[in-house]
Image: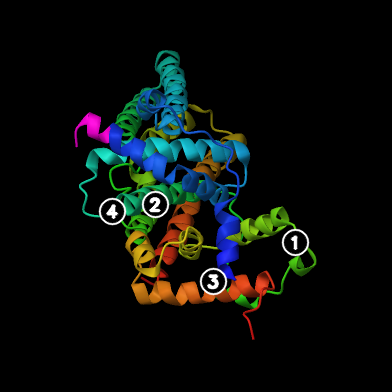
Amino acid sequence: MTGANQDESYRLAVAEHGEALGRLVRAYEADPELRRDLLQDIHIGLWRSFAGFDGQCSMRTWVYRVAHNIATSHVLRRKRAGKQVSLDMLEELPDADNPEESTDEKQKLEMLMAMIQTLGPPDRQVILLYLEDLDAAAISDIVGLKPGAVATKIHRIKAVLARRFHERSAP
Amino acid sequence: MSDDIKALWQKQETEYAPMPLEEIRNKAGKFHSTIRWRNIREYAAMAFLVCVFGFYIWLFPAPLMRLGSALIIAAMFFVGWQLHKRGTTDKLPADDSGSAWTDYYRRELARQRDALQSIWKWYLGPMVPGLVVFLVGASLKMPPAAQKQAWIAGTVALCIAVFGGAWALNAWTARRLQRKIDGLGW
């Protein structure tokens, strides 16, 4: 890819997915200073990566792959990562709070963020992509898990979110 | 239901403005700043030790102590060359960052494991011959006395503790990473 194409691809990617990248780093890094560094690393990595982008996958798939991969390296470099849990464990854990009492969206969002930040790989990647409204096939393409495994995880994610946020399906 | 959560997630405010392209280009060359600073610190420590053991060659008349000092200096240059070689090849994950996450994650764990396993070969190990020769030379030069044996025992114990401790810690972390790789269910 030529330099001009690389720049253009980067511009398009940021215009399309820049906001999602901002949300993604919030889920990977709680420290604001380090979060800024991570976002910068992702932007630089994304721009560099477009030199090797051959169009074999969609731009959206490419952007999310690069972003999640760089964020994963960031997490692995951080030594003070807290204890991580899987979706299975999360289903069994008691609720820490009772958001039923609160309609405060900010509080709900903080709880959601805290929950995501405790998830280990690859559950964290799957839930983040699910929240960005990607379907199982697209998530499978980005994460590299089989579509069936992603579908199972999405099913569990829905159950956890329903229980955590006390929003029951209609009877 | 979960659509509400998705909407909540997607409408959250993010506090970051996009980076100008010019800034990205400028910073792309400095991407590995943490590794570069680590290497600069290592080079500075090595330069200091080269000066110290160079001074020992001049200071101590015992041939074994001089030979040991020279071997340690040679080891420093070897480590410096290795650091340079690894620093220039150890790029940030831009080259394969477009690969599927599971492949990338496995490679990242393996890369960290390999780095820990190889540290003995190119960092700690090369210093051992010089250190041993230097210590043997120093012990031969000491007058025979009760303190001599205690000094030798203490020095050897300290070296074993430092080098053995570093090796054991690295080996333990490498095994932990290997267990993590083995446990990946994909």
Circle 1 crowding by C-alpha within 10 Å: few under 14, some 14–19, many from 20: few
Q: Which residues are magenta?
A: A1-6
B16 magenta-colored: no
Q: Earlier in the sequence, mark 1 or mark 2?
A: 2
Q: Is residue A95 visible?
A: yes
Residue appearing at x 40%, y 22% in the figure = B62
Q: CA distance from mark 3 to mark 1?
A: 21 Å
Asked whether B56 or B163 is in front, the reply is B163
- The spot of residue B153 in percent (x, y) is 55, 43
Asked whether B45 or A135 is in front, the reply is A135
The residue wearing badge 3 is: A157
Q: Quadrant of residue B123?
A: top left
Dividing the image into 4 quarters, which one contains the N terminus of chain B?
Answer: bottom right
Dividing the image into 4 quarters, which one contains the C terminus of chain B?
Answer: bottom left
The residue wearing badge 4 is: A58
- Same chain for mark 2 and mark 3? The answer is yes
| Majority secondary structure in the magenta region | helix
Q: Comparing marks 1 and 4, which lies closer to the viewer?
A: 1
- Same chain for mark 3 and mark 1? The answer is yes
The residue wearing badge 1 is: A103
- The spot of residue B22 in percent (x, y) is 38, 23
Q: Earlier in the sequence, mark 3 or mark 1?
A: 1
Circle 3 crowding by C-alpha within 10 Å: few under 14, some 14–19, many from 20: many
Q: Earlier in the sequence, mark 1 or mark 4?
A: 4
- Same chain for mark 1 and mark 4? The answer is yes
Task: Tell me the subunit letter for badge 3.
Answer: A
The residue wearing badge 2 is: A64
Q: Comparing marks 3 and 1, which lies closer to the viewer?
A: 1
| Outermost residue, right side | A101
Callout 4: helix, strand or loop? loop
The type of residue carrying mark 3 is Ile
